[in-house]
Amino acid sequence: MSDFPEFIKFLYEEYRHLNSGSLASYIPELTKADPNWFAISIVTKEGEIFEIGDHLQNFTIQSISKVFVYGMALEDCDRETLLEKIGVEPTGDPFNSVIRLDENSKRPDNPMVNAGAIATAGLIKGSNATEKLNRMLDMFRRYIGHDVFIDAPVFMSERATGHRNRALANLLLNFDIIENNIEEILDFYFQQCALVVNCHDLAVMAATLANRGINPIAKKQAVKPCYVRDILSVMYTCGMYNYAGEWAYRVGIPAKSGVSGGIIGVIPDRAGIAVFSPLIDSRGNSVRGIKVFEALSDQFNLHLFDSPLPKCSFLDISKNSEELISKPLKVTFDKSKSL
Ligand code: DON
């Protein structure tokens, strides 16, 4: 961990001039972002902070909110009830796709794509829209550790242009996944996406998930620990949309992106990482964000399936490791117990 400051400085310098990708324009307000904004933040479960760049620059959380609202729905409904309404299968489709919902399942594939996130929003408990919104803001407050607010122009901009999301909500109503209060549910969804955060906040939120749901700075429980496993599982398989498979292969960290350019990653029991750079690729993932996560994962062996053995071929492994590999297995196969 002592190498983090030097390495993130190196990554910041390495990628700050990478200008491929473009600003999200389908929500008009998001085009006001500065394409040069760039920040990397790491918060460990002990509360250590390493960050560089525009880590205090505010932006809207967008799809990264889906992770945390899903956690709220798990607490409100429990795992099995939620699974009846929203699956946990990756789609391989764009985040805002309508097709699969109609053609295949009649139930959203997972809570990270828009269909599943809108269905999740419809399951949040509260006697009216204000109570639901206040519960959502309280939840984010626990993760972030300070007061939170919603960017009204971004909310209004998405509300005015979110025709695809409105189409998804109508299909969800048709399949009895949500109730007949579509505009209220969509408002909740647009509000969660318009929550204002900065890169530092996102790293604290990710670190909270790394720390069994306890915010490592404020030392407060943000989500019940029993649901952290569920949240991280859908992040791992579905968090990067139609890049989720390649992300799992190359980076191997449960993660979630948003179209405003944030990506969070959770290293269970160790740290939360956030990168912010608003230039995104065609799948809605930050271009510099992907590069930074790939490099961090590689440099610090953060891939979930990295073995503790040194990264090298079988031919040049150290003597120690060679001994380890050639040790006979301690368990023996008992034929009588097999089929
Ligand atoms: O529903 C939408 O289109 C946006 N509010 C959120 C999309 C998003 O962030 C997708 N992420 N990459």
Image (cartoon, helix red, strand yellow):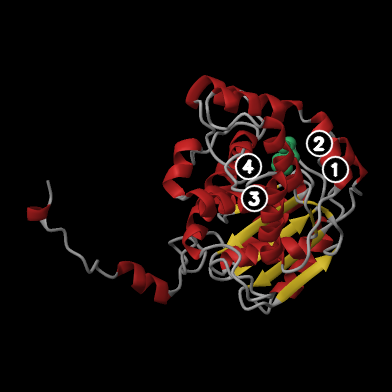
Q: Nearer the viewer, mark 4 or mark 2?
A: 4
Q: Is mark 2 within 8 Å of ligand 1?
A: yes
Q: CA distance from mark 4 to mark 1?
A: 18 Å
Local SS, label 4: helix
Residue nearer the viewer, 2 or 277: 277
**Which residue is the site of mark 1?**
154
**Which residue is the site of mark 3?**
256
Quick one: quadrant of the N terminus?
A: bottom right
> How many residues crowd around disc 3 within 10 Å: few (fewer than 14), some, or many (20 or more)?
many
Residue 76 placed where, x, y %? 53, 51
Left or right of 132: which side holds 30? Answer: right
Q: CA distance from mark 3 to mark 1?
A: 20 Å
Q: CA distance from mark 1 to mark 2?
A: 6 Å
- Residue type, numbered disc 3: Lys
**Which residue is the site of mark 4?**
121
Local SS, label 1: helix
- Please report whichever mark, 3 or 1, sits nearer to the chain's N-terminal start: 1
Residue nearer the viewer, 92 or 198: 198
